[in-house]
Image (spheres, rainbow, N blue to C red):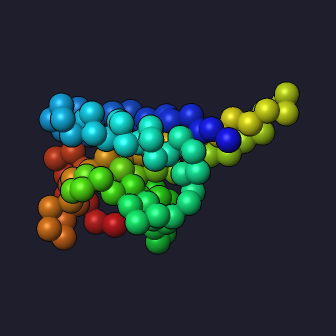
Amino acid sequence: MSYEIVYAPIALGHLRGLDARERALVVDTVERQLTHQPDNATRNRKLLRPNSIATWELRIGDLRVFYDINREVRSDGGDANRVLILAVGVKRGNRLWLGNEECEL
């Protein structure tokens, strides 16, 4: 089963704040890691405790991608499964930066 990747407008803004190499790394890793089985926890993918950002986190070095999974059955019986990228951040020490704002999980 394949999942469609959808970026929230705020996440696109976060991506624009990264340099070109980091942006390419995030987009490529999201496509490879989250298109199939995004709800399987791995060394770099984990289910988060309840928070105001997202349900899941994907770690890519110092970069963090926060996402939710949306599963739907269409009226024609097909699946409309989506991974919603809600935020992209940078971890510096024990601090998380989303865009220009420091954030706590």
Instruction: Say which quarter of the image contains residue 9.
Output: top left
Name the residue at 16% across, 47% down. 100
Relative horizontal placement of residue 58, taking residue 17 as reference (left or right): right
Across and down, in percent, residue 83 comes to 53, 43
Measured along the vertical axis of the image, is residue 50 above or below residue 9? below
Q: Work out whether residue 66 or residue 21 is closer to the camera in this orientation and state it.
A: 21
Across and down, in percent, residue 4 comes to 56, 34
The answer to whether residue 100 of the structure is visible from this angle is yes
Relative horizontal placement of residue 97, taking residue 58 as reference (left or right): left
Counting labels gives 0
Outermost residue, right side: 76
Q: Quadrant of the C terminus?
A: bottom left
Q: Work out whether residue 54 or residue 26 is closer to the camera in this orientation and state it.
A: 26
Across and down, in percent, residue 92 comes to 15, 61
Q: Quadrant of the N terminus?
A: top right
Instruction: Say which quarter of the image contains residue 15.
Output: top left
Instruction: Say which quarter of the image contains residue 19.
Output: top left
The answer to whether residue 52 of the structure is visible from this angle is no
Q: Work out whether residue 31 or residue 12 is closer to the camera in this orientation and state it.
A: 31
Outermost residue, top side: 76
Name the residue at 40% across, 66% down. 43
Name the residue at 50% across, 35% down. 5
Relative horizontal placement of residue 38, taking residue 78 as reference (left or right): left
Across and down, in percent, residue 13 comes to 28, 34
Measured along the vertical axis of the image, is residue 51 above or below residue 59? below
Name the residue at 21% across, 40% down. 22
